[in-house]
Amino acid sequence: MIEHIVAALITEGNQFLVVQEEKDSYFKLPEGGIKEGETEIQALKRELLEELTARCEIIGKLLSYDLTSKNRMFKFHIYRVNLLDEPKQNPSASEQNERNLRIFYVGKEQLKSADAAPSFKQIVDYLERT
């Protein structure tokens, strides 16, 4: 079974917004799964509200790609997004999920680093072409 994941590419100047959970050694784009009955857009808006407490404007879909990790199959759907609010950690989400989410910006070179999630390779390749 393929798990569909939506993710937001959010930029500020030449920097990209990423998140990192305390338990993880790597950072990633704000992302999340699509619940039954949701569209990709609905799921992305919900995830950004949950993770960043920010409303957003969806600019458009950039790319989709497949990834297999730990015997699980994923289909990532990456969207360019503008935030309408300042991103910040959602305290109630952190308490519910017992996760401490760090929100910060990185440059394109950092996206290529070992600290980036494995799913970044396709995104970096896309950014190199554009």
Image (cartoon, rainbow, N blue to C red):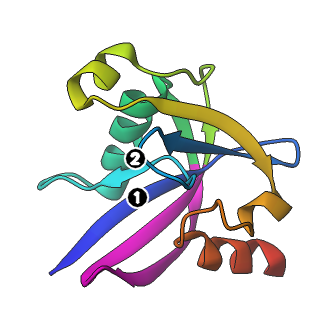
Look at the picture and state if 49 lies above or below 105: above
The one nearer the camera, 19 or 83, is 19
Q: In the structure shown, which secondary structural element does the residue marked by tag 1 occupy?
A: strand
Residue holding disc 2: 44
Q: Residue at x 12, y 56 (%)?
A: 36
Amino acid at circle 2: Leu
Q: Amino acid at mark 1?
A: Val
Q: Residues within 10 Å of mark 1 (few under 14, many from 20)?
A: many
Which is more toward the observer, 23 or 110? 23
Q: Magenta part of the protein: which range?
A: 59-80
Residue 85 colored in magenta in the image:
no
Give the residue drawn at x 53%, y 53%. Answer: 25
SS assignment at label 2? helix
Which of the 4 image quarters holds residue 71? bottom left
Give the residue at mark 1. Answer: 6
10 Å neighbourhood of mark 2: few (<14), some, or many (≥20)?
many
